[in-house]
Amino acid sequence: MPTLHWIGKDKVINHHLAVPFKVLAHQYGFDKGNQSATETHSGNKIIHGDNLEALKALLPEYEGRIKCIYIDPPYNTGNEGWVYNDNVNDPKIKKWLHEVVGKEGEDLSRHDKWLCMMYPRLKLLHKLLADDGAIFISLDEIETFHLRSIMNEIFGENNFIAQITLLCNPKGRSQDKYFSTNHEYISIFSKTKKEKDSFSVIKNDTLIEKEYKLVDNSGRYRLLELRNTHREFNRQNRPNLYYPFYINPDTGTVSLEKTSAFNIPVFPLWPDGFEGCWTWGTDLAKKDNYLLVAIKSKGKWKVYRKSYATLTDGENVKKKLFTIWQDSKFYTEKGQSAFGNLFPGLNKNDFPQPKAIDLLSEIFTTCTSNDDIVLDSFAGSGTTAHAVLNLNKQDGGTRKFILIEMEEYAETITAERVKRVMNGYADKEATGGSFDFYELGEPLFNEDGTLNETVGIEKIRRYIFYTETQTALINTLHSKNPYLLDVFNHTAYYFIYEPGTITTLNHGFLSSIQTKAEQYIIYADNCVLTKDFMAKRNIIFKKIPRDITQF
């Protein structure tokens, strides 16, 4: 696979590993219209700080758990007038480039700088994305090619889903020289992609049920009515566009491909009748492709209609969408209008080109449901949270949002917008909801490699467990033993740690263990047990802080 090279790439390709791990310092909780020092534990988070460090801080709790990532990074237009400095000459970015890339960074073009900035952030976003999740990235023509190239490296070329062309400015950009650009792009990648697609026709579909009577005692059905009702099944018009499918007898779901699980074929028997088949149709008015599936059940034919689904196989986009989005509700001016209603004292020059709420709602509708988590690491004005809250109000969902914003307006604009949406603004009803606001706190490790005790023992415990299991520590306290982290894959993890005190793994501690496990991994300052003794009892000792992994 061709790869993209630029000045500084060798310095940033693994830079995410060198980023110091910092804890999230809770500032306040917002719940039921009130702000307090109490943490809401709602799952909704707004984080103020460098998104590279913030993304790393999220790993212990969220690696592999984010269902949908949407980012609207700097477009790298060279426009110095934006509140969100858009040519990656922001002083924070320039300082970071000097520290990471070194003197070589003085020769970087603006494209080099953009790639150096984006690459480690995308590496961490890939870690956070769920296996069945999808990432959506908004850009214009300036960096879309470069983005596609590095996304192929990080996410895999085979996991490219689509590139949406978005009509966002029907009047066109006035500053353009030759052609007045009126579109942007949304690039979509998945985390993983299975070889075969499957879909369910039994559950959660529009059902059109009607009895189609037997022609005679031969067992054959009269399908003329079926063909007339659903023109897609009309053999005269579509002689070769209906297909067999395969049933999983255990789940009642259906696949278009035969597999070990989907092993019972349902063949079309045409023209006299069939046991079951599927075909497809297009509703141009609704810009929707759909499937029609006909199944005989208990003497009746049932026809299910569903938006065409690649569904479960990592592609994660629940209906087959068109790659050109031109609905006026997606226009940039809609985002500006909504922002103006939220902040009547400001205008579009104070915060230019926020995304339209309906645009992000459309994205999240395609790939989230229930209590899925949505992450936006270039949060800007907070449109992502606004769209998530609106969707939850519409369908009763409990989706969670995590926003990261490095600029100072993270509190005055981003978080303030979320508060107003939850409380209601202008003529909009309150969505309700709660969130917690965080700053990036101190690093977990001091410069000499020792643990920074000021971050708090619970944050250290969560970090240790994550480095061992790559999963979040849920149960933080155990009555049987306060040093027990948890049991994972038949291994019990212990962290014998007391601030300012030397701890020792000895026979006395072993006698306090009540949790049974196949293996024990125990952290302490010292160990007096022999290697043979520990080997016979499947005990692994790890020394604090030497053996604590820094990632």
Image: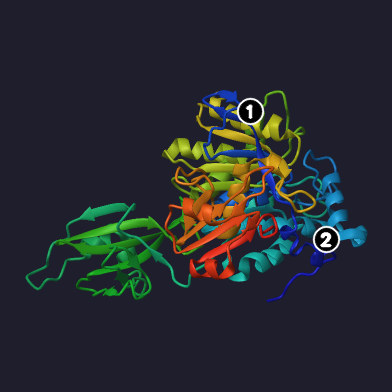
- The residue lying toward the viewer, choosing from 260 and 516, is 516
Residue name at image x 54 percent, y 29 percent:
422
SS at badge 2: helix
Residue 359 vs residue 511: left or right?
Answer: right
- The residue lying toward the viewer, choosing from 118 and 434, is 434
Q: Position of residue 346 (x, y in %)?
A: 73, 27
Q: Position of residue 48 (x, y in %)?
A: 70, 39
> As shown in the figure, which amino acid type bears the numbered disc 1?
Leu
Mark 2 residue crowding within 10 angstroms, few (<14) / some (14–19) / many (20+):
some
When the figure is inspected, residue 160 is found, relative to residue 480, above or below; the finding is below
Residue 103 vs residue 537: left or right?
Answer: right
- Decide which of tag 1 and tag 2 comes sooner along the chain: 2
Residue name at image x 47 percent, y 64 percent:
313
Disc 1 designates what residue?
342
Mark number displayed over residue 112: 2
> As shown in the figure, which amino acid type bears the numbered disc 2?
Asp
